[in-house]
Image (spheres, rainbow, N blue to C red):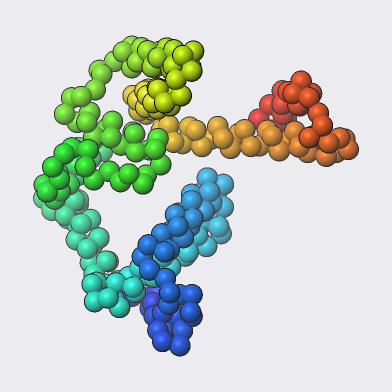
Amino acid sequence: MSKEIDELIKIVARLRAPGGCPWDREQTHKSILSCLLDETYEFFEAVENDDVSGMREELGDLFLQVVLHSQMATEAGEYNIDDVAREINEKLIRRHPHVFGDVKVASTGEVLKNWEAIKKIEKQERKYLVDGIPDTLPALFRAEKIQSRVARVGFDWTDMRPVLDKVEEEFAEFRRALENNDQENAMEELGDILFALVNVGRHKNICAEDALRATVKKFARRFRYIEDAYNQSGKDIHKTTLEEMDKYWEESKKIVG
């Protein structure tokens, strides 16, 4: 273990010890879950922005979360950070028999197939195929993982036509629910549309989560342009018209993409 990592472990233990930081001492696995999510998404943003220094900083923040949770478990007599590292080391070796064993593979596809076969053996306690996919995942990402999981046993279309037809079918049902002012059914049908669209993306190797994130980022970039335009002109954006904002919106497409 490097000197720096050992020092971090000691710092966290000191923060959690009697006489340490009151805030750190009060925390539990559940109370700091949001911190883990925050740091994950901050690292995600740094990667998307090619921010190398930001990536380094956010990886440190993520590693702090690993050390904190491990320290809590150590205090409870459950496991320690060495156990965490040992478990992932063993898993990586076990799931890469083509590197650490005598299994031969000819492609990435074979590697993934072996990975899933080994994982299936390890997770035999699961009763259903869709078990083990956390409910807490972002919904679009979870939908794609569930679709991929059931596709392994052939529950999937083999060409795009029925995949696209399903989107049209669900949209028609959504439209009928809106026309009937059926709010509950409209919500269900909107979910079905999103699920069907995720399936379209999956069939074309497009991650729906990534696609929507990019679109939201694009929308925010364009709306910032609109706000800047109003600020520079001295106009109040709260006292304008949709038509005028739409003019700036079209302009933003050419200026900021």
Residue that protrudes farthest toward the right in the picture: 234
Residue 190 appears in the picture as rendered:
no
Residue at the spot 68% in from the left edge and 26% down from the top edge: 253
Residue that protrudes farthest toward the bottom in the picture: 19
Residue that protrudes farthest toward the front in the picture: 181
Quarter of the rendering occupied by the N terminus = bottom left
Relative horizontal placement of residue 233, taking residue 174 as reference (left or right): right
Considering only vertical position in the picture, is 177 above or below 46?
A: above
Relative horizontal placement of residue 7, taking residue 255 as reference (left or right): left
Considering only vertical position in the picture, is 152 above or below 185?
A: below
- Give the percent coordinates (x, y) of residue 69: 35, 68
Considering only vertical position in the picture, is 67 above or below 238?
A: below
Relative horizontal placement of residue 153, taking residue 80 as reference (left or right): left
Nearer to me, 31 or 10: 31
Residue at the spot 17% in from the left edge and 47% down from the top edge: 119
Nearer to me, 143 or 217: 143
Residue at the spot 24% in from the left edge and 22% down from the top edge: 156
Residue at the spot 25% in from the left edge and 17% down from the top edge: 158
Query: Residue 143 occupies which quadrant of the picture?
Result: top left
Residue 142 appears in the picture as rendered:
yes
- Give the percent coordinates (x, y) of residue 12: 42, 77
- Give the percent coordinates (x, y) of residue 150: 22, 31
Query: Residue 17 occupies which quadrant of the picture?
Result: bottom left
- Give the percent coordinates (x, y) of residue 28: 38, 68
Quarter of the rendering occupied by the C terminus = top right
Nearer to me, 174 or 111: 174
All told, the count of numbered labels is 0
